[in-house]
Structure formats: structure tokens, C-alpha cells
Image: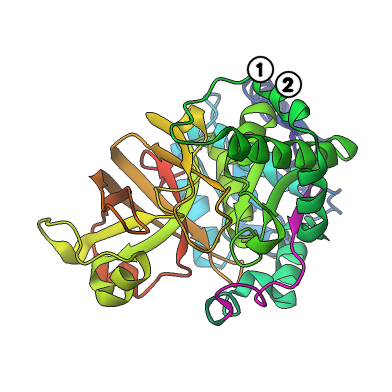
Amino acid sequence: MIKARIVPLYFERGRDADFDTQLNALKQLLADLVEFLEPVALGSPIPVAEAVLFPQMLGDAYRQLADFKAIDLPILIITSEFGTLSMWDWEIASYLRAEGVETIAPYNLAHTQTLCKGLGVKRELQQTKFLVYQDNPGEGFQASIFKRFYWWEDECTQRMMRKFGITLLKKSYKTLGAEAQQLPDAAAEAVLVDWDYNTEGVTSRALNGAIKLYAAIKAELDQDPSIRSVGINCLNESHYSDTTPCLAWNMLYQERRLIWGCEGDTVSMLTKYILNRALDVPIMMTNMYPFLLGDAALKHERISHFPEVDQPENHILVAHCGYLGVLPTSFATEWTLRPKVLAIVDDNATAIDARMAEGPITLAKLHPSMDKITVVEGSLEGYAQYPDSDCLTGGIIKVPDGHRLMSNFSSHHYLLMTGHHLID
């Protein structure tokens, strides 16, 4: 984990013993998460960092408002020895907020730690490369659908790079697919010796094909450790490969916590990266099929009806590539690699049939503007199965207000996290 760089700030009257005592306490509490830079006076130039910190608040804050407004980094107020805001500082924090200065004032140590992890991710992203394999996105299968997706627009890429500092690399999926297929079966079989998976119904040829794609991607990663997320335009350009990357994504997450991107969806990759690293929670991407959408959703999954539930307007069927979606084994309560479901991919392809734990769940995704995130808490209530469809097993999620969510969806792709994480 890369530590967040945080600059402690003191008021123009100067540092005192209370400031140093609190700062030393925070250095002990947050030693594993924060690189504390040398303190500077409020109003002085601030070195490169992810945030500034006030370990002490004084009435001087009311008289240095202009200096607060000049700060262009997150402003943390952590003024108690327990790693939280002190209640005596609500007044100053409220004053600053009223004057247009947003501060972050955590009220328990767990929130403070999560905050610091998030700031560490902010720094890490500036040293991180996302790799996407694609050739002519939108020009392959189902072009009328895939040409609509924002994540392939140059504008989207530029916004991501400006906002988060990542580097996005693009390489040929056609070349990757050819390289994988040229690997000998013996190489794939040697890899499988170290892995133990339930592969019900998967032929040895299909399993070897999935492993060969894993090996080809891994070879690329070994050449550049700064690549920490990889996506493939695996459906729209599936003609470039005789397999799908589902098993590879599982193996590479288990090995090196690599974040994967189904369909080369870079916005999902970025959302998943930030939330997985900052919150340290099980997370996956899947498609949203709100019951409110009716026949438009049912037709796409080739099913005749939604499950019978109370309050259908507040329910969503979630599924991707025939099942719930790509879910690493460490996140799953059940996990099986099966033959492919979708007609759009090669007959040799595979798909993951896995389940997350039922119960509290959180949906989230970055907005296309990259300046906000849609988050809603709900419940994974169970699973629905539809034989001879494109949804052999899908999850059933209940949300508080389906109509409101319909008005705020930013994509058909959303990230699911086990547990409720709205506050974090």
C-alpha cells in the first residue's frame, strides 16, 4: 500500500506544544497509512501532497478565511488524540462550511483510517497504468449497442487522466488472442497444477484456452509492475479470441489483486479500483435490469418474466454473461467455471457461475463527469434461474426507491459491494 502524503498546517501565530502533542499522537495512530510531511504555516506554499491536516484548531481560523479558501487540497480536521474531530471544533467547521470551505472531519478512528487509505489510493493512481486490449471498439458484434458506450470516447479517457492521474495504455486484442492460442497445451497444463477449480462441463480444450489467455496477460504484466488494472473488449471483439478472460481475471486478482475490466469498461475499472483499494471490500461489476424497465430488460436476457417479489418497483435483476458476473473465488460463497452462455462468444469460451453472500449490498459507479459517484445501499435477497436463457443465474437486489434510482443511473454497468458502505 502506498502511503498518503499529508501536510500538517498551523496558524500564523506559530506552532505550540499542543500542536506537536496532537501531531505526534496521529503519527502513531496512522503510521501505516500516512507519510506526514513537515508542518507549514497556513497561508504558506504547500508542497505536493494528497491532503492537508489541521491537528489543532484555533479561533484564528475565523480571521484566516482567505488562506483556507486558497487551499486546493482536501482539508482534514483531526484534533482529538483518538484520531477524530474534537467536538469543540464543530463551530469552526460549521463556519468554514457556511463560507464555502469544505472540510473532512471524521468522527471515529475507522473513518479516519478509511479516509487515509483513500488518499493513499489517490497517490497510487498517479503511478498506475490501466491496460485495455481492443482494436476497433464498437465495430464488432452488436455494434448498435456497443457504439453507445462512453468509456470508449477520447473525452472519457482524458477526463479520467486529468482527474485521477492514471495512464491508460491500449494494445491489440487481436494480437493478444493470437499469442495466447500459440502457447502449447503443456504450458497451460503446467499452470493448472497449482490451481484447484470446479470446472463442471468445461472441456480440457476450453480450460487450456482460458489458461493460455491468463498466461499471455500475465507475461505482459510481468514486464511492467505499474499496470494494476487490465480490461478487454471481450464481447464486442470476441472474434479475436477462442476464449473469454473470466478465469484469467479471477486468477490475476487472487495472485496480485489485479483489477479487471469486462468489456474494456474503463469507468468500471476505475470505480472498482478506488473502492476495492480504499474500502478493502469484495466488489464486482454486473448489468442492471430494473423490474421497472420491463420488456426492454427481459428481451435482452431472453427471459419471459421477472421473479415474483413484493414491491417489484424496488427490485433489480443483476446478471452478466449468463450468470451473476465475474466474481473472484475469495469473494464467493459458491464458485464454478462453466461453458459459455452467450452466443456472441466463441464456442470454446467459459463463464464464471458464482454467488455473493446474500444480505446487505452497496451499488456504486462513477458519474461520466468524474466529479461524483452514484451510491445506493440495498439488499441481495436471493437468486433467480432461467434455463435456456442468457440469465441462467441472476441476483435479485432490493433498493429503497427504484424510481429514484432509475432517474440517477449513470450506466447499465454497476459495481456491487458486499455490505453497506454509503458512509465510507
Disc 1 crowd, CA 10 A, few/some/many (<14, 14-19, 20+):
few
Q: Amino acid at mark 1?
A: Val
- Please tell me which residue is depicted at 56% across the width and 40% down the height of the picture: 276
Give x and y (percent) for residue 310. Answer: 9, 57
Query: Is residue 256 on the magenta stretch?
Result: no
Tell me, yes or no, if residue 229 can be seen here: yes
Q: In the figure, is residue 245 to the left or right of 283? A: right
Q: Amino acid at mark 2?
A: Ala
Q: Quadrant of residue 148?
A: bottom right
Query: Is residue 131 on the magenta stretch?
Result: yes
Which mark identifies residue 193? 1
Split into 4 quadrants, where in the image is the N terminus?
top right
Q: In the figure, is residue 65 to the left or right of 216? A: left
CA distance for labels 2 and 1 = 6 Å
Which mark identifies residue 116? none
- Residue placed most toward the observer, 367 or 73: 367
- Please tell me which residue is depicted at 78% across the width and 60% down the height of the picture: 174
Helix, strand or loop for disc 2: helix
Helix, strand or loop for disc 1: loop
Q: Quick one: which residue is furthest to the bottom in this view? A: 144
Disc 2 crowd, CA 10 A, few/some/many (<14, 14-19, 20+):
few
Tell me, yes or no, if residue 277 can be seen here: no
- Magenta-highlighted residues: 126-143
Q: In the figure, is residue 135 to the left or right of 296? A: right
Q: Quadrant of residue 39?
A: top right
Give x and y (percent) for residue 386. Answer: 26, 53
Q: Are marks 2 and 1 in contact (CB under 8 Å)?
A: yes
Q: Which residue is mark 2?
A: 190
